[in-house]
Image (tube, rainbow, N blue to C red):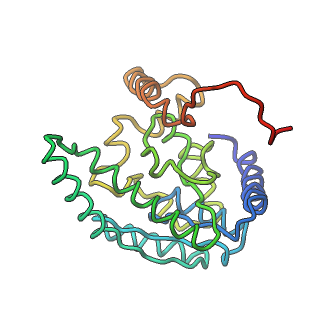
């Protein structure tokens, strides 16, 4: 983790960055998917400091998820005086999943469990963009550096946003920032989980965030964990890159 004095300076920097980015985009505010976890809570705190609570809208999107998560999300919104609305995606998800299963079954294609899980964050991101566009807002991202390094994110789901203030901060750094800004301890110290299944992030990954962070900072960690991290990093490069586009040489008059 970066030194505390450096992190405190970075907090001021990221708050200014959020404000400047939103202003330069001519947006009226931001929407944040408020999951009840530390990442979204920290982003909500940063955005409210940067823009004022009235220009931040938190959206809770339960989808066959743990009820406590929605309570925690509301706790965070209340702590910063930010308006929160609930859009329950359980019925739309169930209907879409069954429609997809039935259609694929008719064509001898099986919808695998991982595909079912990834529908949820993509449905949530569709919802965030629908609301943001309706309000003239931007979608602010919530993913952290540790997740990105091992590809623990859904492409065009939770890794999609207009801009992301946490993308270069590790898990421990996010915890420090959130705690410093007043995110409730209950949320900051909650075991990281995506809210889509019954396992924690670390149980799914097979490594701990501490090991990932150690590797980011020093280039080494437990040998077994290091092998897993390297493997995941290589296999998920596509999640950290823009869509490749075949290049054709031509003059761009807009840049002249």
Q: Nearer the viewer, residue 161 or 228?
A: 161
Q: Is residue 159 visible?
A: yes
Task: Identify the residue at image location x=43%, y=76%.
Answer: 86
- For the C terminus, the image quarter is top right
Task: Identify the residue at image location x=57%, y=75%.
Answer: 79
Q: Is residue 186 visible?
A: no
Q: How many marks?
A: 0
Q: Is residue 199 left or right of residue 74?
A: left
Q: Is residue 219 left or right of residue 253?
A: left
Vertical placement of residue 104 versus 73, above or below: above
Residue 23: x and y in percent read 77, 63
Q: Is residue 99 left or right of residue 193?
A: left
Q: Nearer the viewer, residue 4 or 230?
A: 230
Residue farthest right in this picture = 256
Residue 4: x and y in percent read 70, 47
Task: Identify the residue at image location x=53%, y=28%.
Answer: 215
Q: Nearer the viewer, residue 246 or 234?
A: 246
Residue 49: x and y in percent read 71, 67
Q: Nearer the viewer, residue 194 or 88?
A: 88
- For the N terminus, the image quarter is top right
Residue 20: x and y in percent read 78, 58
Vertical placement of residue 182 versus 13, above or below: below
- Place residue 70 in its image quadrant: bottom left
- Place residue 72 in its image quadrant: bottom left
């Amino acid at each position: 983790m970066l030194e505390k004095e450096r992190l405190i300076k970075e907090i001021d920097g990221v708050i200014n960055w959020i404000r400047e980015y939103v202003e330069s985009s001519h947006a009226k505010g931001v929407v944040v998917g408020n999951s009840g976890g530390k990442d979204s809570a920290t982003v909500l705190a940063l955005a409210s400091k940067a823009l004022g609570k009235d220009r931040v809208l938190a959206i809770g999107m339960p989808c066959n998820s743990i009820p406590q998560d929605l309570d925690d999300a509301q706790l965070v919104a209340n702590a910063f005086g930010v308006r929160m609305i609930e859009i329950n995606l359980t019925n739309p998800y169930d209907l879409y999943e069954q429609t997809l299963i039935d259609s694929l079954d008719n064509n001898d294609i099986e919808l695998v469990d991982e595909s079912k899980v990834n529908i949820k964050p993509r449905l949530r991101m569709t919802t965030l963009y629908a609301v943001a566009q309706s309000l003239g807002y931007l979608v602010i991202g919530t993913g952290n550096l540790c997740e990105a390094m091992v590809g623990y994110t859904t492409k065009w789901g939770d890794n999609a946003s207009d801009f992301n203030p946490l993308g270069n901060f590790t898990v421990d750094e996010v915890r420090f920032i959130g705690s410093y800004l007043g995110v409730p301890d209950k949320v900051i110290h909650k075991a990281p989980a995506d809210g889509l299944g019954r396992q924690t992030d670390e149980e799914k990954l097979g490594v701990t965030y501490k090991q990932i962070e150690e590797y980011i900072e020093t280039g080494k960690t437990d040998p077994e964990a290091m092998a897993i991290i390297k493997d995941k990093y290589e296999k998920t490069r596509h999640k950290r890159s823009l869509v490749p586009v075949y290049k054709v040489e031509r003059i761009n008059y807009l840049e002249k």
